[in-house]
Amino acid sequence: MSSEVRPDGTLPADVPYRLPWRSADIRIGAHRGKLEGSGGFFRDVVPLLRSPDPRRIDLRLSAHDPFEGLHVRRFEQKVSVAVYALVDVSASMGFRGHADKMRLAADLCAALAAATRRAGDAFGLMGCDEVVQPDLLFLAARARGSEIEMLRRLRTFVPRGRGTRGLIDAAALISGRRKLVFLISDFYIAREETEELFGALAHHDIVPIVLSDSLEIEKLPRWGIFSLTDLEVGRRRLVVMRPSLWEAWQRRSGRRRAELNAIAARFGRQPFEIRDRIDWDRLGAHLVGGSA
């Protein structure tokens, strides 16, 4: 895979992902499931009365049964899963420094949509600030047409809303069978609200994706006078940067990351950080090796 968007603007050939759990979906797909079927992984051998399918009689085991019982092989049916991207589109996502967070989010969703289509899974997207944005509400589907439209709208959306309560509202819209949920945000979210959000999504396999721009915190100069704007509240202020203030901001950023890591750890997967650009190889390794 390429480590970033190619010079011609296309995305990498594949973004692999693995489910470390069995899906309860009934549609045939590429993942391990809870249902029996004709294909997939070998599960076990049971008496014919427990699984009355004479087509799968294990002749060798049945011939060696001292009680002359018949035994059949059982297999797991490979099934599909619904995949959702819940995207934070609040005002802080409009920050542009070394990167464009909304473009990163759109590129990531485009790659995920293509990967789910190839795997036979359904892909849905919800863009949220203080509410679930109606123009960015797409329930999971396999239709190519809806995929193209959702990505077009996401790429042209201008973040202005304050807050991220809509992400919690979105969790209620995707209840039901367990799903793979990519939670994409810069996570400038209060700890209490982050706890509530992860709690609302606890039934699903949550993959937190942190979008960050190094110019926001890490690469700020230690000295200088800056006119900074709080995008969430639209307030501008003059800041005189000095080493003590710079270090305080770094510590605050570190605490925020540690809080997010601690919350995410209780729900399965550690956050994956995308800083300035998407490293597709590292992302793929994270998705294949993650646990839930």
Image (cartoon, rainbow, N blue to C red):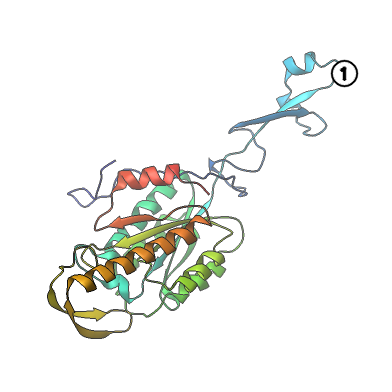
- Which image quarter holds the N terminus? top left
In the rendering, at what x and y percent does residue 10 appear?
Answer: 25, 50
Looking at the image, is 54 positioned above or below residue 243? above
Point out the residue furthest to the right here.
67
- Percent across and percent down for residue 153 are 34, 68
Q: Residue at x 40, y 78 (%)?
A: 163
Q: For mark 1, does the 10 Å Cα neighbourhood hold few (<14), some (14 to 19), or many (20 or more) residues?
A: few
With 52 as the anchor, is 123 left or right in this view?
left
Left or right, 269 with respect to 175, comes to left
Q: Is residue 222 left or right of residue 139?
A: left
User: How many numbered marks does the figure carry?
Assistant: 1
Where on the picture, by quarter, is residue 187? bottom left
What is the x, y in percent for residue 239? 19, 81
Q: Farthest residue in the front direction?
A: 244
Residue 182, position as x, y percentages in the image: 44, 58
Quarter of the image for residue 99 reads bottom left
What residue would you read off at disc 1? 67
Q: Is residue 277 visible?
A: yes
Which residue lies at the image location 43% right of the left edge and 62% below the top edge? 260
Compare residues 91 and 140 and report the one nearer the observer: 91
Q: For this view, does 144 lie left or right of residue 159?
A: right
At x 75%, y 17%, the residue is: 61
Tell me, yes or no, if residue 15 can be seen here: no
What residue type is disc 1 on? Phe
Residue 254 or 12: which is nearer the viewer? 254
Q: Secondary structure at mark 1?
A: loop
When the figure is inspected, residue 131 is found, relative to residue 46, above or below; the finding is below
